[in-house]
């Protein structure tokens, strides 16, 4: 190893893991063994080991020693692994979850709801009327049918199950949310990636992707995960026009995942404004009102939504009407709506402040929408190790990207930053050029 500082040792070991010279499960030298071999103090090696552990590359088994970390939590879908935030860090910016302090209080809503949300029939309509009416009134475009499900991913999963066949192609943003890729793999679907610019899917790339005759176009209209990009209304109209004119993709259905709608600082946008019979729009309330509520909604043409509802009756049947009543209270009570407004602007402020802090420290980060930011780096693994050395955990960019040729990036959950923005910005600027 050329550099014998804690960071240099950690980086050297990280490279050996990346190249495969050290395989998952391999035992590492003891702290004293490596310190003696390198001519450094045991404290120097111990600090390097702590950095590698924080980066998720090695794990300690007590007296048995330290080992290269195996693939974590085998029950998780492949691209979920490494995104579950199980490793300790002083500042964890890897999870992609909202700041708990910015969620509206559930206690008052629970007290107001009481025990009035119930059902006497397994065949009753799945949605409570007051929530259904509110969703319809606030939907981003006129809609024929809406139904409530257990979050955005549940809605997308059930839509795919109702609409696709094994081997179908799906046009999707690249990069995209890793569970989307796992979900497409599960159904035997072929993803066709489309690059993004500051306004959403690139029109020329979108047009080329439609040449593959896709069954589905899957996109995130606002607060795109991981990039934080929100599609403009002009770009949505442009994409809708390209799709409408495409003869090859004339039967393609658009599924839109508006997962951060209530805390997005960008206006509502949907291709359904121009293609109402071809768009299923999904709205989730997990990021804004609490992940454990597990509530989202899907709306679109009645024949498509009816297929989702009919299939769901053979499984869970409906989303708890009690939970629906709680969500309705959160969406309508003044204290809760004020909390959401404050969260929206808090996240926007954190995005802008971090982007500015990175730029002031000599790096570059585009300010985004929602809770995540996408930082280009020279070397992904080196950047993660560099940040772990100062106690900051971020998400690797690889799982968010399709194919083998990937641009090195890391995802940073900006929404988790309550303070230390200048310090984190400086650390990100240094990590951006780490190699």
Image: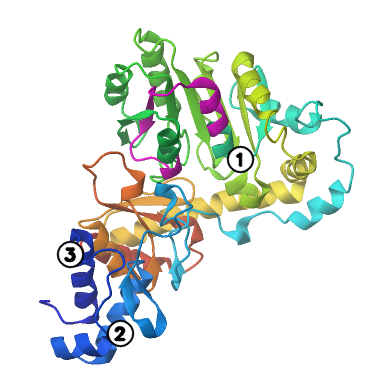
Where 303 falls versus 172 (above or below)? above
Q: Is residue 165 left or right of residue 303?
A: left
Which structural element holds mark 3? loop
Name the residue tied to disc 2: 46
- Point out the frontmost of discs 1 and 3: 3
Answer with mark 1 or mark 2, whichever residue precedes in sequence.
2
Q: In this orientation, which residue lies closer to the viewer: 396 or 235?
A: 396
- Quadrant of the rendering where the N terminus is positioned: bottom left
Image coordinates for residue 218, horizontal then vertical, percent: 44, 29
Q: Residues within 10 Å of mark 2 (few under 14, many from 20)?
A: some
Q: Which residues are magenta?
A: 157-179
Residue 151's tag is 1
- Residue identifier under label 3: 21
Q: Earlier in the sequence, mark 2 or mark 3?
A: 3
When asked about the image quadrant of residue 357, the answer is bottom left
Residue 40 in the figure: left or right of residue 166 = left
**Foreground tag (1 vs 2):** 2
């Amino acid at each position: 190893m050329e550099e014998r500082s804690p960071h240099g040792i950690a980086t050297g070991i990280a490279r050996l893991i990346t190249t495969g010279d050290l395989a998952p499960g391999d035992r590492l030298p003891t702290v004293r063994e490596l310190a003696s071999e390198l001519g450094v103090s045991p404290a120097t090696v111990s600090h390097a080991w702590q950095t590698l552990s924080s980066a998720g590359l090695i794990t300690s088994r007590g007296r048995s020693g330290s080992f290269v970390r195996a693939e974590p939590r085998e029950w998780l879908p492949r691209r979920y692994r490494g995104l579950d935030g199980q490793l300790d860090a002083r500042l964890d910016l890897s999870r992609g979850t909202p700041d708990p302090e910015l969620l509206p209080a559930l206690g008052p809503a629970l007290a107001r709801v009481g025990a009035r949300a119930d059902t006497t029939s397994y065949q009753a309509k799945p949605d409570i009327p007051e929530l259904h009416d509110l969703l319809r009134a606030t939907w981003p475009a006129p809609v024929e049918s809406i139904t409530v499900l257990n979050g955005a991913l549940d809605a997308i999963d059930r839509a795919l199950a109702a609409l696709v066949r094994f081997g179908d192609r799906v046009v999707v943003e690249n990069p995209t949310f890793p569970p989307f890729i796992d979900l497409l793999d599960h159904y035997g679907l072929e993803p066709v990636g489309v690059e993004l610019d500051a306004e959403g899917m690139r029109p020329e790339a979108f047009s080329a992707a439609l040449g593959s005759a896709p069954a589905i176009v899957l996109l995130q209209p606002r607060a795109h995960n991981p990039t934080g990009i929100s599609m403009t209304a002009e770009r949505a109209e442009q994409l809708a026009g390209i799709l409408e004119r495409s003869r090859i993709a004339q039967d393609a259905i658009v599924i839109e995942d508006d997962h951060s709608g209530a805390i997005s600082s960008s206006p509502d946008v949907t291709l359904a404004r121009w293609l109402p019979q071809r768009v299923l729009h999904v709205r989730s309330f997990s990021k804004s009102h609490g992940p454990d509520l597990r509530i989202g909604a899907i709306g679109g043409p009645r024949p498509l939504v009816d297929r989702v509802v009919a299939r769901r009756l053979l499984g869970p049947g409906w989303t708890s009407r009690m939970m629906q009543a709680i969500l309705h209270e959160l969406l309508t009570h003044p204290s809760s709506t004020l909390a959401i407004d404050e969260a929206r602007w808090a996240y926007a402020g954190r995005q802008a402040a971090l982007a500015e802090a990175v730029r002031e420290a000599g790096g570059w980060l585009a300010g985004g929408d929602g809770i995540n930011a996408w930082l280009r780096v020279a070397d992904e693994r080196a950047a993660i190790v560099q940040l772990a050395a100062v106690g900051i955990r971020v998400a690797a960019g690889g799982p968010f990207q399709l194919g083998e040729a990937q641009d090195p990036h890391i995802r940073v959950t900006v929404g988790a930053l309550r303070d230390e923005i200048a310090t984190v910005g400086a650390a990100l600027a240094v990590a951006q050029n780490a190699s």
